[in-house]
Amino acid sequence: MASFVDRVVLHVSGGTGGHGCVSVKREKFKPLGGPDGGNGGDGGDVILRVDSNTTTLLDYHHAPHRHATNGGNGMGDWRAGKTGETLILPVPDGTVVKNKAGEVLADLVGEGSEYIAAAGGQGGLGNSSLSSQKRKAPGFALLGVPGEEADIVLELKSIADIALVGFPSAGKSSLIAAISAARPKIADYPFTTLIPNLGVVQSGDVRFTVADVPGLIEGASEGKGLGHNFLRHVERCAALVHVLDCAALETDRDPIGDLEVIERELEKYEVDMSYAGTDGDVVPLNRRPRLVALNKVDVPDGRDMAGFVRPELEKRGYRVFEVSASSHEGLRELGFAMAAIVKEARDAVEKAPPRIQPPVLKPRGVNYKGGFLIRREERNLEPLFRVLGEKPVRWVQQTDFTNDEAVGYLADRLAKLGVEEKLFKEGAKPGDAVVIGEGDGVVFDWEPTMIGGAELLAASPRGSDIRVEDFSRPTREEKRGDHQKRKEARAAARDELEAERKAGIWTESVNYKHSTRPADVEGNVEGNEEA
């Protein structure tokens, strides 16, 4: 069972914000006391934090999906929803956060360093927070916004000053155990070391950390062996120490050949931008200060081999030390040499001023309308206008489309932001499709003649908006048909009343005003009197 994991893919999502509440204050003798709906609580964040007690990413290998707590919904009587709890994920010191494309998002170095991997969603406003002088009693509230979702890559890069590199069974684990208090596993077979080991060394007044990296072999850059997978743990190191086995049992190996193989593998390894000096540049591994430790000189054959290859190594410019992890021979001199390199590197970091790009301040323009843009597209041979921007997308997520008043409020917000004016400039026509957000988004049939303003809400009941109700202007033919129907209905009513008069219910004709001859009227009157 694996006990050390230094690279995981983590799926994180912030908590969803709670919905706002729609409520009206009702008390005795005060049935309509005004809106009192509370706001929804914000969703919790997902935060990565460096913890000294965490040394591996194993927990996230077994459980890669992490979600923060959602915010609570608002309630009446101005009661706000509960804020979602922040999810703290402890990570080892030296963890690098990247996205799926390999871009570095954060380099967490130092106890307590934090990075917000996924922010929680914003809680929706209740109707009490939406009330204004013109909108005195809103019949709607805003919905909570979903939290951010992200797929991130966590890579552990050990914080070490010196790295020990070499072939398997070269004695790196024995060497780090001899110069520090580290106790790695030591055995007489290759690839005993499966994980990087760290040890703290004190040489004089300099204290530094040494990393033991799993053994490298030829072809490691093509995936052979284990060491190349762990070379990220030496990217932060100031110097490398080549540990060469002078008592190797293989007849086809020698210290100089091993050194050349390791140098080629180091040259093929590309250090990413997560490690950079004060000047912003990255130094390749094969160009950093290097020392050579000829190990196992306590063995007679090893001492002879060390004396044979040392002149050649010094000729190539290496500082060579003959050491023995068993008898501790030469370890003091090697320790002081490593301490000198570490001290020099630390002094250079302190003296060299960091290269900082001065910020460029760009004032907003006079006609600045907020962060949004409109992109013209085509769908099914019909024009389509896509509105992109943080505010419009968030506003759509907050809108309850089952509530007409909420839809009208969204229209007011978009018009105030300048979306309608921009659509006119882009050539949009009535009836064109407008999409807010990427993908399918929310599709509207744009109607630019819609009247804007909350001053018309007095004519609408709460929760509705006359501007978004279904209304169509009748055509001329429809008007003529309605007029003809009304004429026929009036004629039928007159005929019915005339029939009732003749039956003796009424004494006066309903058509007397339409008579053209006064004599007829007088005759009718005389006839009635005679009757």
Image (spheres, rainbow, N blue to C red):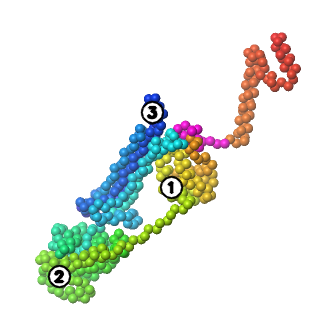
Q: Does the image show residue 76?
A: yes
Task: Give, as a three-letter code, the residue at label 1.
Answer: Gly
**Is 470 a magenta residue?**
yes
Contact, mark 2 vs mark 1 (Cβ under 8 Å):
no
| Label 1 vs 3, first from the N-terminus | 3
Earlier along the polypeptide chain: callout 2 or callout 1?
2
Residue carrying label 3: 26
Quarter of the N terminus within the rendering = bottom left
Identify the element where label 2 is drawn. strand
Callout 2 amino acid: Glu
Part of the protein shown in magenta = 458-473
Instruction: Please report the residue visible at 28 percent of the width from the left and 64 percent of the height from the top.
Output: 110
Residue lying at 45% horizontally and 38% vertically, measured from the top left: 23
**Residue 494, position as x, y percentages in the image:** 75, 24
Q: Position of residue 283 (x, y in %)?
A: 34, 76
Q: Is residue 5 above or below residue 460?
A: below
Mark 3 and mark 2: Cα distance apart in space: 90 Å
Labels 1 and 3 touching (C-beta < 8 A): no
